[in-house]
Amino acid sequence: MARPFLLHLCLFLSCLGCSAPRVSGPTRPPAIAADLFAPFAADLTRIVAAARADRGAFEKLSQLCDGIGNRLSGSQGLERAVAWAQAVLRADGLTNVHAEPVTVTHWLRGQESLELLTPRSAPLTMLGLGGSVATPPDGLVAEVVVVHDEQELKALADRVRGRIVLFDNPMPAYTPELGAHYGETVRFRGHGAALAGKLGAVAVLVRSVTARSLATPHTGNTRYDEAVPPIPAAAIATEDAALLSRLAASGETVTVRLKMQARTVGTAVSANVLAELPGRELPEQIVVIGGHLDSWDVGQGAHDDGAGCAMAMQAVALLKRLGIQPRRTIRVVLWTNEENGLAGAKAYAQVHAEELAQHVAALEADSGAFQPEALTVEIEDAEHQAKAALQLAQLVKLLPQMRLTIRQNGSGADVAALKSANVPLVGLVMESSTYFDYHHTAADTLDKVDPALLAEGEALFAALAYVLAQWPGELGE
């Protein structure tokens, strides 16, 4: 990323040629030297080998998951995690360890239940969606209208008023070619309540966003439309969604009782946690690496995103232990409130606005502790983004036994707040064939994490952070 002087110079030079005719034609990809990162090959081999032999990330994740547990914004668990992270980072010898206060939404789940009343009586498995409002104290009893997409909701609009809408939109099975289909199916979790509420529904149920389930519901945040009265919203296990769909399709009248005590009690004070491995020559220039410290209020937040935090923390601890001090500063940032507000990401961008021109890259891991599969790169300037993708492709060729693809666009929810400042953003993408089996559930626990794969993520974090902090050039320039 260009420094302010260079930006002004480039603008001046471009203005000199404003009147010159432009030649149209195919855009040529920028030339990238094949040996761009060759001087770092030996160091990369050393870093990756040390990380693969290290179990420090798993030890940190164990402390976070088993010692603290889940960490929803506003909870005591998140407060304990903020204090724990600072203590661990200080013990690892990092500098400028501190917490930066962030005001976050404080939502409480309360007691909740869902019961099938007709055509037979049976308990159903559910989890209220984050941000949902409550039902009346005695619950809501209403007929269920089943829809599979927006078009079907529109077609059945005259039946929705006074009823509970179930969005039964199955997630297709994962394939290596098409991935996990998360983006295709999560929309009803986010906007289903607003869509159904606009038509007069009294509540909404959403099929859990997963292709596989053992009666395990998946929570997540829902969003209301200010112009539509909010209605209670819950996720139900895929098995129960399929049951209600079959009953409705057979002509049965499906009636349920939904009880939820969910409420937003205002705001609370949380914090982002920061720590640094200072640069030896250009300490004012910063490479950010991190994940989000908060989680949902079920399970332990092991894959989402305790793993990303542990990888980042241990990656910098490893470089410190190896005696590596690159030219630029590597800053660990553990963001708060990613799950239900992104307040931590927004606060970081605001607090550090004046130094964002000195951020040479921001790396985020938020896709679990699985085999690293790809790197995404995203920069506000499209030409720089294309060049950065080619640079990263050269870099990953030097990582021992890693087979990573490079994808343009997409980075991470937290680092995305830095895009408008033209900070190069890099996302660490893990193989996701099983990630959505656990995502946002009570099953996202430490036993689902392979220590060797967690160490592989640590190795990738450490290697990328080291090169981007040590390399004389800058990503995308």
Image (spheres, rainbow, N blue to C red):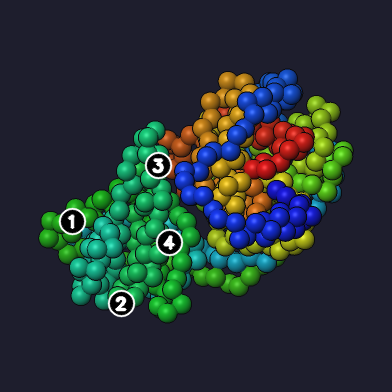
Q: Verify CB contact (< 8 Å) between mark 1 and mark 4.
A: no
The residue pinned by badge 2 equals 200
Give the quarter of the image for residue 375: top right
Q: Secondary structure at mark 4?
A: helix
* The residue positioned farthest toward the right in the image shown: 280
The residue pinned by badge 3 equals 180
Q: Residue at position x 80%, y 41% from top?
A: 328
- Label 2 to label 3, Cα distance in Å? 33 Å
- Label 4 to label 2, Cα distance in Å? 18 Å
Q: Earlier in the sequence, mark 3 or mark 4?
A: 3
- Amino acid identity at mark 2: Gly
- Amino acid identity at mark 3: Ala
Badge 2: residue crowd in 10 Å (few <14, some 14–19, many ≥20): many
* The residue positioned farthest toward the front in the image shown: 20
The residue pinned by badge 1 equals 247
**Eye-nearest disc, 1 or 4:** 4
